[in-house]
């Protein structure tokens, strides 16, 4: 009978194209608004490395101004980034399975192909563990080896996009690329990798694309590159003085560790406390109990990647969808009651109330499906508008899960909207309409 | 086949209550062709609606095919309508979006027949009413007489025990009406009981017997238990 109901639904939709279009439009507008906000929320609230959430930790130690906390509203938290001297010191620990300090740097890429103009990009410096601990996928080659973390080796890993641009997508491992007037040997090319939110460094924008090239952090002191992230200082420092800046209390690096066992986690926490204790004894402003060891999910929460306004917007868009559905209820009632004659004939010919009810709900589902399709189109436009309005330069599109949610919401919402009208029409006494048909 | 005893049907408003049927009793036997006549408002259509289980009644007993149908659920009533009763209406009541095939298919769908069985029945029914070549036509492409023949095909496709016809020729000219009447007679000769409400005395006379309804009651109680007779006898008597 389901196929039969589908056929009747299609006929009914075609019979009243204007009324049907109004209902589809009402649902599409509601779904469009709701899915735009839900997709925004879903993108922002996702954990792109959920499978390692219990072993990865962003690390922070509090060597901030003793006179005032870094976060006014959460004084128990250390700064969100780390000083260079602390990062270098912590990097000596052998407790973590993997560890990396990482930061953004600017670089001008000069393609060998003279047809491609040089372009400036914000790259990233990190230690080789960065790729292993974040499960970064490679299309060609691999990360640089541990030797490049110890001695200066001018090697680089390119993003897929950069490799496409500079090497036309071919395997460029072993080839040379010129960055900031210096030649680097390509050791690896990433596959598609754009974690959203950008959990490993939300400080420069949680929804920016990942970097187009990566260099060994070991080269930092040799290259003295132009840094590209945010820098927070609580003591005066001459930032033009490279050594002075590196030894300052300015926090500007992200520090991550992978601790696979509870024992590792406990020992590392103790290690951080001991380190801060030692720094305090050395006369630095250090609070031994102010340690940050946050999982990616906790880190996104602390960074307020998903703001309260996003949740409010999802709520408001859900209310708007309900208003659209209430409109649809009225239109469905008008449509169904306009068909009371036909329904009476069906009842006379043996259709039970339940069968009539089901027939109407299948029609509602079909209208919802159409509304969902057009709603997705409106949602795509909505997401474009959001990107434009908020200068959001990351990927903001529906994934498979959101598509499923959109269709399920559209169909279920339409069926819910059709419950009352369908109930009304299946209770119409047939005798009254058969004579007057 | 059909046995109504002291059926009453009351329509109530805040101010008045009107008896559409009052102590209405009638027995129709298997294979009979009964015409029901009476002036407008006498209760003919109400009787037919109750007989067809399209409407509830307030008092009395109604046995259909040996089963007391007075207190059945909606589902059970729908099943009986679908399996035992065929309806023919004055206004044809075809579904305008559906072609002839699909219109005849409607009761068979609710019956749960398989596709092949439905196809065979639809074809046979439409061929029987002379519309086998127009199965894909829409009702709007047919004359009134043809539409009523489609309605008859729809009524007989499920092989019902009884056909209830409410003014089946009321919207047709005399030639078409005669054709439709002949079809009904053929169906009755094949064994299907027919109860037909009509205003037309000539058509009423062609039934085995005529039941006259007046003020919600059968006007001649003697007719209640009249035995089944051959059509010739009935026609000769009238």
Image: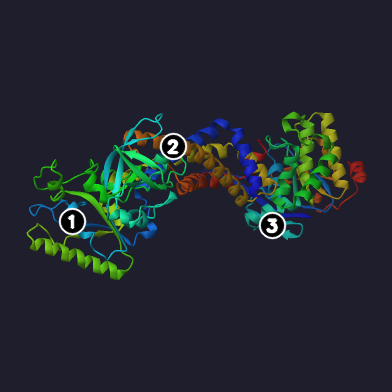
Determine whether, in the image, residue A232 is placed left or right of residue A104. left
Please state the horizontal and vertical placement of residue B30, each as a whole percent of the image: 83, 53
Q: Which residue is mark 1?
A: A86
Instruction: Point out which mark residue A380 bears.
Output: 2
Q: A321 or A290, which is in the foreground?
A: A290
- Say which quadrant the C terminus of chain A sits in: top right
Circles 2 and 3 in contact, beta carbons < 8 Å: no
Q: Mark 3 and mark 1, same subunit?
A: no
User: Residue B194: in sight, yes or no?
Assistant: no
Q: Which residue is mark 3?
A: B69
In the rendered view, does A207 fall on the left or right side of B223? left
Whole-number angstrom distance, CA of label 2 to CA of label 3 = 57 Å
In the displayed orientation, state which residue is furthest to the bottom. A263
Read off the chain for label 3: B
Q: Closest to the observer: A35 or A269?
A: A269
**Mark sitting earlier along the chain (1/2):** 1
Circle 2 crowding by C-alpha within 10 Å: few under 14, some 14–19, many from 20: many
Identify the residue shown where x is 73% and y is 60%: B67
Q: Are marks 1 and 2 in contact (CB under 8 Å)?
A: no
Indicate which label's residue lies in the foreground, 2 or 3: 2
Q: Is residue B207 left or right of residue A305?
A: right
| Marks 1/2: CA–CA distance | 45 Å
Which is closer to the viewer, label 1 or label 2? Answer: 1
């Amino acid at each position: 009978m389901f196929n039969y109901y589908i056929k009747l639904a299609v006929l009914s939709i075609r019979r009243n194209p204007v009324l049907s279009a109004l209902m589809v439009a009402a649902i599409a507008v509601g779904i469009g608004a709701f899915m735009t906000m839900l997709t925004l929320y879903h993108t922002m609230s996702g954990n792109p490395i959920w499978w390692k959430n219990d072993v990865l930790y962003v690390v922070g130690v509090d060597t901030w101004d003793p006179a005032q906390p870094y976060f006014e509203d959460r004084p128990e938290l250390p700064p969100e980034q780390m000083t260079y001297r602390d990062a270098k010191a912590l990097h000596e620990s052998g407790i973590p399975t993997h560890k990396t300090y990482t930061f953004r740097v600017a670089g001008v890429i000069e393609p060998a192909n003279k047809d491609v103009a040089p372009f400036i990009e914000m790259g990233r410096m990190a230690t080789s563990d960065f790729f292993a601990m974040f499960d970064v996928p490679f299309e060609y080659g691999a990360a640089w080896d541990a030797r490049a973390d110890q001695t200066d080796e001018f090697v680089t890993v390119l993003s897929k996009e950069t490799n496409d641009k500079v090497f036309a997508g071919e395997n460029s491992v072993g080839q040379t690329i010129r960055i900031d007037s210096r030649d680097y040997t390509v050791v690896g090319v990433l596959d598609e990798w754009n974690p959203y939110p950008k959990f490993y460094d939300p400080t420069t924008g949680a929804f920016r694309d990942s970097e187009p090239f990566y260099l060994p952090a070991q080269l930092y002191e040799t290259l003295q590159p132009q840094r590209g992230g945010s820098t927070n200082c609580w003591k005066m420092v001459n930032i033009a003085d490279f050594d002075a800046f590196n030894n300052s209390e300015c926090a500007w690096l992200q520090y991550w560790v992978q601790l696979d066992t509870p024992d590792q986690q406990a020992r590392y926490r103790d290690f951080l406390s001991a380190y801060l204790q030692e720094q305090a004894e050395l006369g630095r402003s250090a609070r031994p109990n102010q340690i940050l060891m946050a999982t990616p999910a906790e880190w996104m929460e602390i960074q307020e990647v998903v703001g309260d306004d996003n949740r409010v917007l999802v709520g408001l868009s859900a209310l708007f969808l309900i208003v659209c559905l209430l409109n649809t209820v009225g239109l469905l009632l008008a449509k169904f009651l306009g068909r009371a004659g036909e329904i009476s004939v069906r009842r006379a010919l043996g259709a039970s109330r339940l069968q009539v009810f089901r027939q109407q709900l299948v029609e509602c589902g079909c209208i919802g499906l159409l509304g969902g399709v057009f709603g997705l189109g409106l949602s795509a436009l909505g997401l474009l508008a959001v990107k434009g309005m908020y200068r959001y330069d990351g990927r903001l599109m529906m994934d498979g899960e959101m598509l499923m949610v959109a269709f399920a919401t559209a169909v279920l919402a339409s069926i819910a909207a059709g419950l009352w009208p369908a109930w009304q029409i299946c209770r119409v006494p047939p005798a009254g309409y058969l004579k007057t048909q | 086949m059909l046995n109504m005893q002291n059926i009453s049907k009351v329509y109530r408003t805040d101010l008045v209550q009107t008896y559409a049927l009052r102590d209405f009793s009638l027995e129709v036997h298997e294979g009979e062709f009964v015409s029901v006549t009476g002036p407008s408002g006498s209760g003919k259509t109400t009787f037919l609606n109750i007989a067809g289980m399209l409407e509830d009644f307030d008092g009395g007993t109604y046995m259909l095919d040996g089963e007391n149908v007075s207190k059945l659920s909606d589902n059970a009533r729908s099943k009986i309508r679908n399996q035992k009763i065929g309806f023919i209406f004055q206004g044809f009541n075809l579904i305008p979006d559906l072609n002839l095939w699909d219109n005849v298919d409607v009761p068979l769908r609710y019956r749960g027949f398989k596709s092949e069985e439905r196809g065979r029945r639809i074809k046979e029914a439409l061929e029987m009413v002379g519309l086998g070549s127009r199965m894909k036509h829409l009702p709007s492409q047919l004359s009134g007489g043809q539409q009523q023949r489609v309605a008859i095909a729809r009524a007989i496709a499920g092989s019902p025990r009884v056909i209830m016809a409410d003014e089946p020729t009321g919207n047709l000219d005399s030639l078409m009406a005669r054709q439709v009447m002949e079809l009904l007679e053929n169906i009755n000769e094949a064994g299907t009981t027919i109860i037909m409400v009509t205003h037309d005395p000539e058509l009423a006379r062609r039934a085995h017997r005529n039941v006259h309804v007046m003020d919600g009651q059968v006007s001649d109680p003697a007719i209640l238990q009249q035995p089944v007779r051959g059509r010739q006898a009935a026609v000769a008597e009238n």
